[in-house]
Amino acid sequence: AQSVTQLGSHVSVSEGALVLLRCNYSSSVPPYLFWYVQYPNQGLQLLLKYTSAATLVKGINGFEAEFKKSETSFHLTKPSAHMSDAAEYFCAVSYRGSTLGRLYFGRGTQLTVWP
Amino acid sequence: DSGVTQTPKHLITATGQRVTLRCSPRSGDLSVYWYQQSLDQGLQFLIQYYNGEERAKGNILERFSAQQFPDLHSELNLSSLELGDSALYFCASSVDMGSYNEQFFGPGTRLTVL
C-alpha cells in the first residue's frame, strides 16, 4: 500500500534562508509524486509534480524537488524563503499505471517564515 | 482561482441532520474527487467519479454518498451527522482518470456539526 511520510509537522525559517521540507514514500513501485500548498482558508494548489521525466523538478514560486529512488524521497526545497511562503505544504502520491488517480497525502508541514 | 467551485463555503448544522455539498469541476474536467480534511485524519480520499460513474471509494462512511450528474457537477450527501464529521470537505477535478494528472482543488466547504 502507498504511504507518505512528511518529517516535521512544523518548520520555521528566517526570511532568505533555505527551505527544506521532507517527504518519503513507501511503495514497491516508484509512484507519481506531488507537492501541494495550502494557504489559510484556501484550497490546495499544485507546486510541482514528478511523473518520471527529470528527477529534479522545478515548480512555481521558486520551489523545486528532487526524486531520489534509492532514498524513496521527494524533498521540497527553495533557496531563499519569502514571507509569502508561509503556508501548509502537503506531499502526495498516486499509483503508477492506475486509472483511478486518487491521491494519498502526507500529514502536512506547516512552514513559518520569520522576518 | 482553480476553476473548481464549491458551495456552500460554510455549513453549520446539528447532529443527526443531513447536508448536501455541491461541487462544479473545471470546464472540461471529467473526473471529480472528494476529500475530507480533519485534524485527526489529515487529508483523506473519500470517493471518485468519472463522467457520471463511480470509479473508486476510499474511507467513506456508509452514511455518506455522492453522485455526479450529466452536467458533471457533483454532490456529496452526508446524513445522520455526528460531531466527528466536522471537517473541511474538498472537491477536486482532473481532466481524466490518469494518476499522473494534476488535481485542481476547490476552496472547500467547512462543515461544523454541533
Image (tube, grey):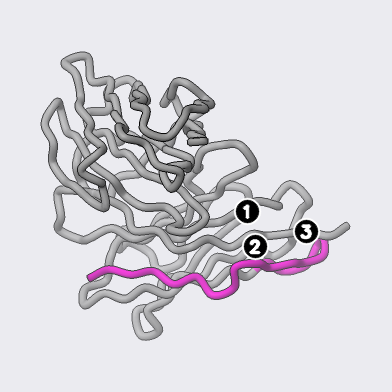
Which portion, as a residue range, is magenta?
Answer: A1-19
Query: Type of residue at label 3?
Result: Val
Q: Which of the 4 image quadrants contains residue B23?
A: top left
Name the residue beneath numbered marker 1: A62
Pointers 2 and 1 in contact (C-beta within 8 Å): yes
Q: Position of residue B56 (x, y in %)?
A: 16, 46
Give the Cα distance between marks 2 and 1: 6 Å
Side (left or right) of B33 relative to B62? right
Q: Which of the 4 image quadrants contains residue A33?
A: bottom left
Q: Chain of mark 1?
A: A
The answer to whether dots 2 and 3 both sit on one chain is: yes
Name the residue beneath numbered marker 3: A113
Q: How many marks?
A: 3
Give the Cα distance between marks 2 and 3: 12 Å
Task: Indicate the secondary structure of the residue bearing disc 3.
Answer: strand
Q: Chain of mark 2?
A: A
Evaluate whether residue A5 shows in this view: yes
Q: Position of residue B2 (x, y in %)?
A: 47, 30
Label annotation for residue A13:
none
Query: Type of residue at label 1?
Result: Gly
Precedes in sequence: disc 2 or disc 3: 2
Q: Nearer the viewer, residue B1 or B18?
A: B18
Q: Position of residue B63 (x, y in %)?
A: 24, 39
The answer to whether dots 2 and 1 both sit on one chain is: yes
Precedes in sequence: disc 3 or disc 1: 1
Q: Considering the image in quadrants, where does the N terminus of chain A appear?
A: bottom left
